[in-house]
Image: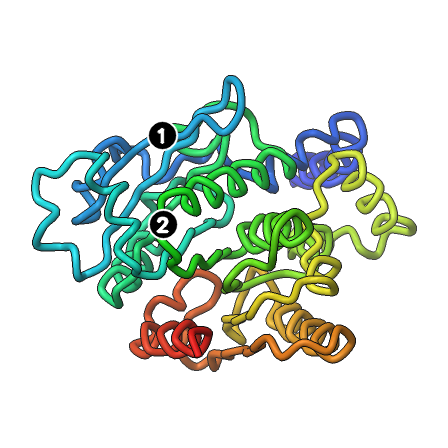
Amino acid sequence: MKRPISFLITVYVSVPVILYLFPWILGQVIFAHLLRFPFFVDLSRPEDVLNHTCNFYLNTEEGISVGVWHTLPASQWEKSAMRSPEWYRETLGDGTPVIIYLHGNIGTRAINHRVQLVKILSAAGYHVLSLDYRGFGDSTGDPSEAGLTNDALYLYHWVKKHIRGSLVCLWGHSLGSGVATNAAVKIQEQESAVDALILEAPYTSIGEVVVNHWFMKMYRFLPGFESFLWNIMKMTNIVFANDKNLKSLISPLLILHSEDDNVVPYHMGLELYEISLQTRRKLNTDAHVEMISYSASLGFSHSSIYLDPNLSGVVRKFLENLRH
């Protein structure tokens, strides 16, 4: 009995020591990009899991190639058989809204909940471009906050070059919500506000998610541990500060969050909603801000909001209001 207890105590004590000596490990855990779920999907063949979809790659900077799936809106489904990537690219000019989907950590663009969401958005009549950031899936390079943001920015500008006045929406889920607001801030500073932002299960900052994680809570009683953890976060140079970003963003915003989210606490979504309302009042802008909350009784948790039968209607109403 003593040996198992001694082992558990050793493991418990070793975690803070390991984080102090190797802070980069925390970054690996945050991105979790090496867990390339699902393992046996050929990302170059999206048709194995998703119809009306073309795979292509973009060189977002020297030495970095990122994989992207372009899924067509329902209006283009019948014409898509045996079509080339060039034909898919041309369809972006059909006037249909484009949604750039920025997924969360762990796995690739082929994970089931991501595929199911894309199917819903495609059937609702939108082009959807699903990006695997650098280091994720079949994309090259190593992830970093700046790197993920640059990948999203490159795809956004690539889309803008190929559309003809269509609305472009950034949709960020979980980790991707930070990528989305980071990109939106840079676009707003350099050009004009992004047409629309949809944040699914967003956090205030990635550090708050780490500190409030159930595993880290086991150490909260240790004097100074929370400050220690924040210092480690600074060393990783990973912030993803949605709360700070939304204090300046003036894009129309829709927040989707489930009350039973077991990864990003629901109260973080509420806090971001309040920050956005304050920003609108402070900057005297009439950009639409909305939050849809899902009851815990529905069991949507962190990644299953796509199960809402009214989701396509919610998105359609939000985006169509922007045209008036």
The mark that comes first in sequence, 2 or 1, is 1
Mark 1 Cα-neighbour bin, 10 Å: few <14, some 14–19, many ≥20: some
Judging from the image, what secondary structure is the residue with disc 1 in?
strand
Q: CA distance from mark 2 to mark 1?
A: 18 Å
| Contact, mark 2 vs mark 1 (Cβ under 8 Å) | no
Reply above or below: 279 against 50: below
**Residue visible at 77% across and 51% down?**
219
Residue 242: x and y in percent read 67, 58
Q: Which residue is mark 1?
A: 57
Quarter-of-image position of residue 43: top left
Q: What is the x, y in percent for residue 114?
A: 36, 53
How many numbered tags mark residues here?
2
318 and 37: which is toward the camera: 318
x 35%, y 74%: residue? 316
Q: Which residue is mark 2?
A: 163
Q: Is residue 263 above or below residue 25?
A: below
Looking at the image, is 226 positioned above or below residue 57? below
Check residue 247 in the rendering and tell me which mark sits there, or answer none: none
Q: Amino acid at mark 1?
A: Tyr
The N terminus lies in which quarter of the figure? Answer: top right
- Residue sitting at x 41%, y 30%: 58
- Residue 34 x %, y %: 48, 31
